[in-house]
Image: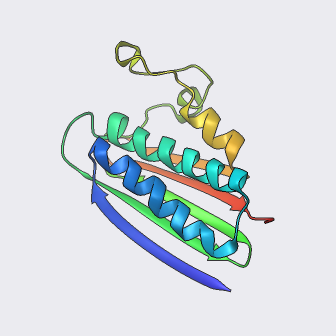
């Protein structure tokens, strides 16, 4: 079975919770375990938070959350059209943060990588970032 949803929302921190709930609601069609659901919510939350805080840095913009189901595989794509990431490999290193003054832990990509089955990040300066995550549901 296949299903696809696309949601676009303002890059405001109060919409991070909306993204979490939306991803969880989409995932429930596969009857995931509570652990699988928590993993999805946390990973999507981290990706959306990164888009808002690092992508737009307080400027106005939009975040796009695309969700797709193919049989028992869920794919989540989070895109922004913000400033982009100069060095994706460096940004993905545990504890690296470009915003230490905001008390960021630098673990966002590490969390995404550990909670999902796959993680892919692509970015272009002044054009934005695209995060693709997949999760196989065994529930």
Q: Quadrant of the N terminus?
A: bottom right
Q: Position of residue 87 (x, y in %)?
A: 50, 31
Judged left or right of residue 106, residue 118 is: right
Residue 94 image position (x, y, % from top left)? 62, 24
State the residue in front, 50 or 35. Answer: 35
- Residue at the outermost right position: 138
Q: Nearer the viewer, residue 60 or 14?
A: 14
Q: How is the image coloured?
A: rainbow
Quarter of image, res 100: top left
- In this picture, is 74 found above or below 41? below
Residue 110, quarter of the rendered image: top right
Residue at 63%, 84% in the rendered image: 2
127 lies left or right of 106? left
Q: Position of residue 93 (x, y in %)?
A: 62, 26
Q: Residue furthest left?
A: 60
Relative height, residue 49 to residue 4 (above, below): above
Residue ranking furthest to the front: 34
Q: Is residue 87 visible?
A: yes
Q: Nearer the viewer, residue 13 or 28?
A: 28
């Amino acid at each position: 079975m296949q299903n696809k949803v696309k949601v676009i929302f303002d890059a405001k921190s109060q919409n991070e919770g909306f993204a979490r709930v939306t991803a969880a609601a989409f995932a429930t069609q596969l009857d995931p375990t509570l652990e699988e659901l928590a993993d999805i919510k946390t990973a999507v939350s981290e990706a959306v938070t990164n888009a808002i805080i690092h992508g737009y840095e307080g400027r106005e913009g939009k975040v796009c959350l695309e969700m797709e189901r193919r049989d028992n595989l869920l794919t989540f794509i989070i895109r922004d059209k913000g400033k982009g990431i100069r060095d994706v490999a460096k940004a993905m290193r545990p504890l690296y943060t470009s915003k230490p003054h905001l008390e960021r832990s630098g673990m966002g990509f590490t969390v995404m990588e550990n909670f999902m089955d796959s993680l892919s990040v692509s970015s272009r300066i002044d054009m934005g970032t695209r995060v693709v995550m997949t999760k196989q549901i065994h529930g």
